[in-house]
Image (spheres, grey):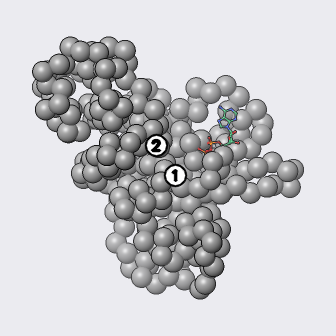
Amino acid sequence: MSNRVSSSKSQPESSEILPEVILQADDVSVSYHGIPALQNISLEIYKNQITSFIGPSGCGKSTFLRCFNRLNDLIPETRMTGKIRFFGQSIRRMNPVEIRRRIGMVFQRPNPFPKSIYDNIAVGLRVNGYRGNLDDRVETSLRHVGLWNEVKNKLKKNALDLSGGQQQRLCIARTIALNPEVILMDEPTAALDPISAGRINDLLMTMRQYYTIILITHNLKQAALITDRVAFFNVEINSRGDRVGKLIEYAPTLDIFVNPTQQTTWDYVIPGSRYSS
Ligand code: ADP
């Protein structure tokens, strides 16, 4: 794997002033039912950046993403080795419910609860014992995602009546209402039309000042335009013939798209072109 932050090859990055590390994965491997899905992943996620995970389907991006808030714990017969640290503390030693509040998640398909727009946000707050003013928190969360003016007169209406793009912004509002530090996003715009996806992209860029975002995307234009750093994963065949996900290259977004160090990265981001270095 080429992590150009620590590479001596690329001088400019060695003087790059890196923000604070918020999450650190150290030699993480995951298997399902004893079959490896992902092996030996080490990388650091920087605070208030958007980091994207790209790579072909099946290379373990979602599996790796779910490691950060221990969602894989909920999948039977899943085993993770290695370590993930959140602000330096091993997440294994932390309460998983607390981790999932601090590291929220947004999925590919908007998945609002079949409840009112208001309750979609209020329910999570109540469950988490929020003691402040619920109305204010609901409004602030909806304002953050640019949805307030669209829904302020129909807060009691069912959230499932909203458009797909509005539902996804509601799901983001529901996540940020809990005041997370990190938001994991698994292809959040893949199911949306280009206009709605563009609104989410704009939103993510403004959210970066408050949150750290990890974004899985198959949309290379989205990765190129809105992210700070890109991790490219690929599938390799191990000696037992298993298809295993590996981290190939991790670097600032511009480097990945303009001057990748690995042939496979090059083939993925600029298909049909030839690697030259
Ligand atoms: P990606 O997000 O890059 O498409 P995934 O993390 O979804 O990759 O999958 C990586 C590998 O792990 C694939 O071979 C997939 O079939 C396997 N896998 C993912 N989730 C499960 C699961 N719940 N049970 C068994 N195998 C799984």
Q: Is residue 212 above or below residue 256?
A: above
Secondary structure beneath label 1: loop
In the picture of the structure, the residue carrying the numbered disc 2 is: 190
Residue depicted at 76% across the width and 32% down the height:
33
Q: Which amino acid does the dot numbered 1 rest on? A: His
Quarter of image, ligand 1: top right
Distance of label 2 from label 1 (alpha carbons): 8 Å
Q: Quadrant of the C terminus?
A: bottom right
Left or right: residue 74 compared with residue 170: right
Please indicate, yes or no, whether residue 266 appears anywhere in the rendered image: yes
- Looking at this view, is 108 or 124 the one in front? 108
Quadrant housing the N terminus: bottom right
Query: For the residue carrying disc 1, how many other residues have a C-alpha within 10 Å: few (<14), some (14-19), or many (20+)?
Result: some
For mark 2, give the secondary structure: loop
* Residue at the spot 48% in from the left edge and 70% down from the top edge: 257
Please state the horizontal and vertical placement of residue 76, each as a whole percent of the image.
67, 25
As drawn, 241 above or below 178: below
Left or right, residue 141 beside residue 114: left
Residue 218 image label: 1
What amino acid type should be assigned to the residue bearing mark 2?
Answer: Ala
Marks 2 and 1, the one that precedes in the sequence: 2
Q: Quadrant of residue 132?
A: top left
Quarter of the view holding residue 140: top left
Q: Position of residue 72 (x, y in %)?
A: 58, 33
User: Taking 247 as reference, is 95 above or below it?
Assistant: above
Residue shown at 32% from the left, 49% from the top: 198
Q: Residue 165 got which mark? A: none
Q: Nearer the viewer, residue 23 or 194?
A: 194
**Which residue in the rendered view is the most extreme toward the right?**
240
Circle 2/circle 1 CB separation < 8 Å: yes
Q: How many residues crowd mark 2 within 10 Å: few (<14), some (14–19), many (20+)?
A: some
Q: Position of residue 125 (x, y in %)?
A: 27, 21
